[in-house]
Amino acid sequence: MTDVTLARLRDEGESFMQEISREYYLAHSGQKATAELQPIYARHAQILGPDALELTLESLRAAADGSEERRSARLLADWQAESQSARQLAPLDEREIAWEGSAVVRVGDTRQIEFERVAIEMANTTNRAERHAIEAARAKLVGRELAPMRRERFQRERDITEQLGLASGYNATFELLSGISLSDLAAQCAQFLRDTQALWDETLPEFTKRVLGVDASSVTRADALALFRAREFDGGFPASRMEESIKRQVREMGVDPVAAGRIVFDTGEREGKRSRAFCSPVRVPAEVYLVLRPHGGQSDWNTLLHELGHALHFAYMRPDLAFEYRWLGDNSITEGYAMLFDHLMQDAGWLRRYTELGGSALPAFLRSHGFQELHMVRRYSAKLIYEIALYGGQVNWDSLPQQYVEQLTAATTFRYDPADAFVDVDPRYYAARYLRAWQLQALLTETLVERYDADWWRNPRAGPWMCSALFGEGQRELAHEQAQRVAGKELSFAPIARAVEKLLG
Ligand SMILES: [Zn+2]
């Protein structure tokens, strides 16, 4: 057996990540029925075993605080710790991916809906009784089949992580390896929920009445899908013009939207394609896929912008950056760039130039977007607080479904279903990355406006700056470090609360 060295870890680690990424891309885009992950783990067993983990932990312990070695070692150790659990969880993940790709929801005696299309159907169904019938059938199926798989998966992930013995418990291990303080972020989330409670209570009834024709006290999460689908604005966001308009904007910003062919847009309908869009960096920066299954209307535009932010980030990373800075690191950064782009949907000037949203529809659309933004940040704030309880080990897991329903319903007013308590959970605190990304994009937008004016998105100098100062750096920095370097500020929810208040007028 050849010795594992850091050089070999980086080298073979990159091949491993490419193979895994390609497998997920093929399965989630509907080009393969299932992802065959286990053979890939078997092929790279040596760089994913206990020796490799120990090597990265040793170099983490040896590196001086604040040094570049420590920065790199923390990323590699985090990756190794994650790989330990990912490797052991691979059979469970394969099982789940196969289930999601083939499950069918039976509504009544006559109707069958592909599981992956259920969210799209509920969002597009105008008949409320039918929407609730689909939701009831979905929740029953999920509760019976998917929820037990997910619960087992999270239990195993927590056990594996705690067995690393790096810190006392899952949460402390996450904080050590990620460089993110969960307790600080949770406190900010609780504060945001309190600060915006009155605004939420005041705004929600207006929307449920106008869009759904119902009282706010009776709405469920299925109604939320239809509400945020916001069909009334579809005319402003034609599917036929979406890709070209958005690409034109990126060109006007001085950036090639396909990065000389490194980015491939996969935006057509295909059976088995996941309903949730994604970006797959198969080789970084050389081969990046942007995958979207069309739902219709403004949400597709929003999603395409989001995934494009990721795709540009991966495709414009400096190729000479170390493996760990291109493939690993704080995903709050890449999510921050994705949100920087999807938040263009809140920019009146951008909407006027690149969409067909007419004059009078514009103020209503912006208001609707402010409402949607407030909902999402409140939902994710509650999710993070709930997930901290899930991973924290202080709560009996049998009581989690009830806690999930209470916390998520309290934050959003929409009635949640206990069947989703282990399904509506992003593994490894991805919710924390999203929340930090929200905070980061607000500061990046402010910086872009200062440097390149309010219409920075069509300033041919803005794109090249973004490529070199932001995308080029990969994920070498933590989101709060980047906020300091670029904007000279701390991450916080304050600019988001201000933006929401402004949109809601
Ligand atoms: Zn994203």
Image: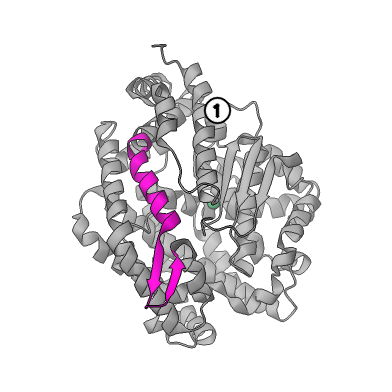
Q: Is residue 274 above or below residue 129?
A: above
Q: Where does residue 390 sit, x and y in percent of width and height?
A: 28, 53
Q: Where does residue 127 sit, x and y in percent of width and height?
A: 48, 84
Q: Over which residues does the magenta segment extend?
A: 86-114
| Disc 1 secondary structure class | helix
Q: Where does residue 100 sit, x and y in percent of width and height?
A: 42, 55
Which quarter of the picture shows residue 156? top left
| Relative side of 11 to 85, left or right | right
Residue pointed to by mark 1? 323
Between 497 and 172, the one lying in front of the other is: 172
Question: Residue shown at 43%/21% (left/top)?
Answer: 64
Between 137 and 434, the one lying in front of the other is: 137
Total of numbered circles in the picture?
Answer: 1
> Quick check: can you spot residue 120?
yes
Q: Is residue 107 above or below residue 3?
A: below
Q: Is residue 209 magenta?
A: no
